[in-house]
Amino acid sequence: MSPAAATRTCIPSPRARRSRRERPARPSRHLFPSFPTRGKTVTEDNQTQAQNPAAEQNANQLDPAFFTCVNEYLELTNKQSRQQGLKRISMASLYAAARFNAHVYLSNVGSRAAAERKDFLDYMSTMYRRMLNEHLDGLGAERGLDVGESELAAEYAAAAAAASAAGPVSPATPAE
């Protein structure tokens, strides 16, 4: 795989967007909200959805600025991988992400770090595994490669069944 192969417009496939409806349990303070990143706690999310039923549909949509940020990171890693190799930059990216996420976690939990550590580690591990599965599924399909059975296959099937049972979906009306 060439380094440029990883650089593509980072837009989730319809399958990936549907699959985000079920998410792993969040740490107690919701320091790292699962996709979509909205910056709200579960309580705030529930209140918004209760007040506006259309909020649930919009909750599964990521801000386009998120994908701009992802694409900028991919451009940087592709540039670095041409100089130092794919495996080295892959490990450097993982190391940097772990360091940054630890920093954000510690900056937010303060004295509760020890008590919430296991929940945080479980959440982040589950989230990474889910994202990796989604990208293996998407890139494998895009490249015509058999990447094996997805851990998310049952979830994809349930989302497809729910979508077909619900009938055609009309586009969301922009908020005024």
Image: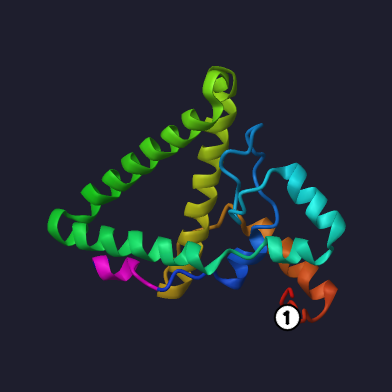
Task: Kindly identify which residue carries mark 1.
Answer: 171
Relative to 112, residue 123 above or below: below
Front one among 151 and 123? 123
On screen, residue 32 above or below 119: below
The x and y percentages for residue 110 are: 52, 23
Q: Quadrant of the N terminus?
A: bottom left
Q: Position of residue 28 (x, y in %)?
A: 66, 31
Image point 67% across, 65% down: which residue?
18
Judging depth in this view, the residue of 151 and 102 nearest the camera is 102
Quarter location, residue 103: top left
Quadrant of the rendered image containing residue 176: bottom right
- Residue farthest toward the front in the current orientation of the protein: 176
Between residues 61 and 118, which one lies in front from this camera angle? Answer: 61
Left or right relative to 128: residue 157: right
Numbered-mark total:
1
Q: Please report the bounds of the magenta region as a residue range.
A: 3-8
User: Which quadrant of the figure has residue 139?
Assistant: bottom left
Residue 55 on the magenta segment? no
Image point 55% across, 71% down: which residue? 13
Q: Is residue 26 left or right of residue 44?
A: left
Q: Amino acid at mark 1?
A: Pro
Secondary structure mainly formed by the magenta segment: helix
Identify the residue at horizontal 32%, vertical 39% (top origin).
95
